[in-house]
Image (spheres, grey):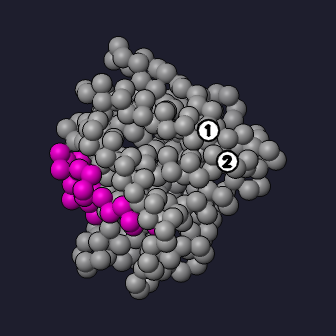
């Protein structure tokens, strides 16, 4: 991977990073605290979460499109905030996160953190006219029983993109991003990755399949150049456990490149898919540092 991961103490938060930390906290409190479990089994929660995300995107000034689909007799929606490119509008960069939670969990880290990051990136770019078209997409139905199936929200969305012949040049999936630890042994991996990566879970990971390795390298290279925060990257077969465990998987199935940005979820976070995945478990200051770095990544990707 290009560049070197940050080592040593983290610099103090800037005033803007502290304000960003507070806003991220607010989003997670609404989604995982006020709303709580949000899925087809708790349909009102899913509706409320979609309403919150759509309202925020519109509040920031984005045009919001809704892709509605009937599943199990109920309407679910993917929400798409669009910034049209001025130089290469047919080339599309997608920033995505799923807003549903697993059954029985309020889903603070998984995945209110990803949605919060999505919203704050959308806020940051709302006044920018990018060269490439930039879409911020909140997906429904990522969690079981829809995971890696035809009713997964991102699969429905990605298939429509392919049917329309859209040219998606990069997709970034923001997935479970708020757990960090400086303790040795806090990080686990599927074999054989433990031989090559650190056992301390203090980093953000950039993860892709082999076909998306150029985006992994480009994203982590930009992140490391601009951000003093630990980072690791991997491009591996999508059959390796964890590599395809989010919405980027759907885009791979229809031939688009995509990567996941994550704290590695069950390989680090003990409250993964548990009722204990609550807002106070999230490290908002470190999430703020990651989102600040991702601003640079997105800005680089939307250039031609």
Residue 181 placement (x, y as % from top left): 29, 72
Q: Position of residue 47 (x, y in %)?
A: 37, 26
Quadrant of residue 83 within the rendered picture: top right
Identify whether 4 is placed above or below 206: below
Magenta stretch: residue 276 in it? yes
Name which residue lies at 49% across and 72% down.
Answer: 14
User: Do callouts 1 and 2 mark residues in contact (Cβ within 8 Å)?
Assistant: yes
Element at badge 2?
Answer: loop
Note whether 98 is above or below 70 in the view shown.
Answer: below
First reached walking from the N terminus: tag 1 or tag 2: 1
Q: What residue appears at the point 19 percent right and 38 percent down from the top-left corner? A: 104
The C terminus sits in image quarter: bottom right
Q: Residue 24 or 271: which is nearer the viewer?
A: 24
Identity of the residue furthest to the bottom in this view = 8
Question: Is residue 179 inside the magenta stretch?
Answer: no
Q: In the image, which residues are magenta? A: 266-289
- Single out the residue that lies furthest toward the top: 73
Q: How many marks?
A: 2
The residue lying at 29 percent from left, 43 percent from top is 32
Is residue 170 visible to the viewer in this orientation of the structure?
no
**Other-residue count near label 1 (Cα within 10 Å), few / some / many at <14 / 14–19 / ≥20:** some
- Indicate whether 174 appears above or below 98: below
Residue 237 position (above or below residue 110): below
Residue 187 image position (x, y, % from top left): 29, 70
Residue pictured at 49% horizontal, 48% vertical: 118
| Residue 211 in the image, given as x and y percentages of width and height | 59, 55
Secondary structure of residue under mark 1? loop
Q: Which residue is mark 2?
A: 127
Task: Tell me the quadrant of the picture where the N terminus can be found.
Answer: bottom right
Given residues 138 and 206, the one toward you in this image is 138
Q: Which mark is residue 61?
A: 1
């Amino acid at each position: 991977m290009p560049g070197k991961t940050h080592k040593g103490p983290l610099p103090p938060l800037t005033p803007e990073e502290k304000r960003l930390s507070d806003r991220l906290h607010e989003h997670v409190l609404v989604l995982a605290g006020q709303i709580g479990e949000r899925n087809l089994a708790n349909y009102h929660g899913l509706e409320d979460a979609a309403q919150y995300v759509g309202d925020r995107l519109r509040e920031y000034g984005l045009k919001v499109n809704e892709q509605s689909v009937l599943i199990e007799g109920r309407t679910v929606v993917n929400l798409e905030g669009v910034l049209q490119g001025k130089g290469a509008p047919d080339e599309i960069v997608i920033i995505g996160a799923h807003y549903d939670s697993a059954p029985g969990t309020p889903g603070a880290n998984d995945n209110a953190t990803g949605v919060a990051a999505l919203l704050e990136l959308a806020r940051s770019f709302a006044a920018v006219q990018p060269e490439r078209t930039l879409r911020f997409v909140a997906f429904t139905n990522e969690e079981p029983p829809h995971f890696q199936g035809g009713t997964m929200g991102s699969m429905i969305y990605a298939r429509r993109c392919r049917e329309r012949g859209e040219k998606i040049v990069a997709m970034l999936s923001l997935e479970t991003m708020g757990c960090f630890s400086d303790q040795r042994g806090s990080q686990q991996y599927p074999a054989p990755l433990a031989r090559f990566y650190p056992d301390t879970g203090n980093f953000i990971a950039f993860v892709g399949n082999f076909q998306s390795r150029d985006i992994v390298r480009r994203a982590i290279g930009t992140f490391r150049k601009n951000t003093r925060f630990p980072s690791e990257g991997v491009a591996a077969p999508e059959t390796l456990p964890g590599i395809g465990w989010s919405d980027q998987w759907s885009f791979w199935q229809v031939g688009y490149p995509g990567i996941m940005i994550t704290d590695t979820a069950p390989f680090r976070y003990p409250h993964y898919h548990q009722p204990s995945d609550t807002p106070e478990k999230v490290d908002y200051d470190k999430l703020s540092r990651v989102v600040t770095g991702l601003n640079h990544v997105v800005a680089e990707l939307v250039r031609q």
